[in-house]
Image (tube, helix red, strand yellow):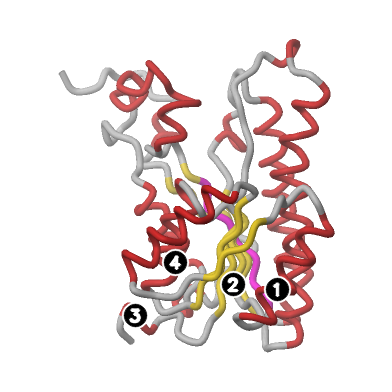
Amino acid sequence: MTESTQLGGRVALVTGGGTGIGLAIATHLARLGASVAITSRKEENLADGRRRIEDDTNADIYATVCNVRDPDAVTAAVEAVANDVGPPTILVNNAAASFACRAEELSQNGWRAVQETVLWGTWFCSTAVAPYMFDNGGGVICNVLSTIVDTGAAGNAHSAAAKAGVASLTKSLGVEWAPRGVRVVAISPGPVDTPGSREYVWKERFDEVSASLPMQRMASPDEIANVVGFLCSPGASYVNGAILLADGGATLAAGTLLPGPE
């Protein structure tokens, strides 16, 4: 099976697919032969992402504006993809929201925005897509998490809590929906080098954080996309309810007291 046919005949829906990790995932799934649909809540991100994927892959990409915090918008977007592209058999819940903020300074609206985007959005999208998968022989749902689920992160209590909820949801739905042919899995990346993370997360600490990692660098979005492609492929057909760590050993090294190479 060649790379371009691994996901032939599959319809893949990637939320937050217009930028960053989501863009890389959508591009890779298209290269693997899937018919890809992307969503974003911002029209400008959607249009630019669609153009970039089509330029890279020569594939026709379906794009629709959708705020995953709105269950009605999610239902409408999934119905549109099913009608115009085909019933989704792959869903990548990548849409996210986060910002650094001390817990005692976090507003109720800030907490709610992150929970609704990350946890509620994953629930809305998964339950909207699942009936199509049940009726069409099954499918794969892949959730994008973060290593802060396991480690916690100062200034990110809201995001860590939301991602931890998605981690639990991955396991619960994996057990519940497996008899109906739906695998639910997740990837847990460490620091990833994207334009957004450079601007909003790491800022002036980018070089410092990169140098502190075991591999002396952050992951590229393509490296995360490659793992998602595997999890969604027939090669991972018996992987279910699992969370695959993709952090270059950063979580393991967090407890290491030995100095790094000079």
Q: Which residue corresponds to mark 2? A: 90
Residue 25 drawn at (x, y percent): 45, 59
Which of discs 1 and 2 lies nearer the camera? The answer is 1
**Real-space Cα distance between discs 4 and 1?**
24 Å
Q: Earlier in the sequence, mark 4 or mark 1?
A: 1
- Against 53, is 211 above or below? above
Q: Which residue corresponds to mark 4? A: 229
Which residue: 56% across, 62% down? 38
- Against 111, is 181 above or below? below
Q: Given the image, on which type of amino acid does mark 2 rest?
A: Ile
**Real-space Cα distance between discs 3 and 2?**
16 Å
Q: Which residue corresponds to mark 1? A: 80
**Residue 54 falls in image quadrant:** bottom left
Which residue: 77% across, 42% down? 116
| Element on which disc 2 rests | strand
Q: Which residue corresponds to mark 3? A: 4
| Element on which disc 1 rests | helix
Residue 96 drawn at (x, y percent): 62, 43
Q: Quadrant of the N terminus?
A: bottom left
Q: Nearer the viewer, residue 261 or 222?
A: 222
